[in-house]
């Protein structure tokens, strides 16, 4: 969970350094978002993959994707991913997701992303809804554009 100021700061970074897409309801309420950053603007991700020959100047990072809980599984997330993919220049896009997030792995897999073998990252999170810190293992997936 994030407070409004934290969300504004994160979104402003996406707008300043990369791309931010919003999905809105017919009433104009934000119901989802997707962000992408040039690989060099995601140094922790770039460092993790740089040793594996990724061309940092031609690679994008799919930074975040979110859809309101009650509106999931209606194609909004897929639409946000496809919209981002259609706007990216370069030759490769990389994303990171929890090893346990089957919905994310399935969505990106259905769009041609493949898991990068033997690459993972342990992420310590303190932003859970319950307010308790957790450790999350992340995998990386990539797609040629």
Image: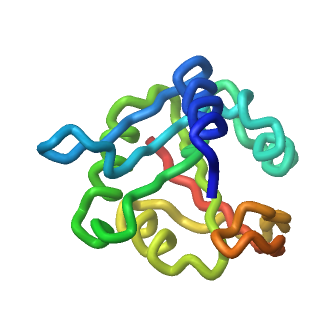
**x and y percentages locating residue 19 in the rendered image:** 48, 28
Corner quadrant of residue 63: top right
**Quadrant assignment, res 42:** top right
Which quadrant of the figure contains the N terminus? Answer: bottom right
Q: Residue at left 32%, top 69%?
A: 72
Decide if residue 127 is on the left or right side of residue 15. right
Left-right relation of 32 to 38? left
Residue 131: horizontal and vertical position, in percent? 74, 69
Label tally: 0
Query: In the rendered image, which quarter is residue 101 located in?
Result: bottom right
Left or right: 144 as drawn, with respect to 59: left
Viewer-nearest residue: 92 or 46: 46
- Furthest toward the top, the residue is 16
Residue with the most extreme left position: 26
Q: Residue at x 37, y 30 (%)?
A: 87
Front residue of 74 and 92: 74
Task: Give the percent coordinates (x, y) of residue 60.
Answer: 58, 36
Pick whichever, 72 or 96, lies toward us. Answer: 72
Q: In this rendering, is residue 68 above or below 50? A: below
- The residue sitting at 48% across, 52% down in the picture is 65
Q: In this view, does 123 lie above or below 2?
A: below
Q: Which corner quadrant holds the C terminus?
A: top left
Seen in the picture, residue 67 relative to 134 is either above or below; the reply is above
Front one among 55 and 97: 97
| Colour convention | rainbow
The image position of residue 124, as x and y in percent, is: 85, 65
């Amino acid at each position: 969970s994030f407070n409004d100021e934290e969300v504004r700061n994160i979104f402003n970074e996406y707008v300043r350094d990369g791309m931010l897409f919003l999905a809105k309801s017919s009433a104009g309420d934000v119901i989802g978002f997707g962000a992408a950053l040039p690989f060099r603007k995601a140094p922790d991700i770039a460092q993790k993959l740089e040793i594996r020959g990724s061309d940092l100047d031609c690679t994008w990072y799919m930074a975040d994707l979110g859809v309101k809980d009650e509106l999931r599984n209606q194609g909004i997330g897929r639409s946000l991913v496809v919209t981002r993919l259609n706007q990216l220049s370069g030759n490769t896009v990389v994303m990171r997701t929890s090893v346990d997030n089957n919905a994310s792995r399935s969505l990106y897999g259905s769009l041609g992303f493949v898991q990068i073998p033997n690459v993972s990252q342990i992420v310590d999170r303190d932003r859970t809804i319950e307010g308790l810190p957790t450790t999350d293992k992340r995998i990386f997936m990539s797609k040629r554009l």
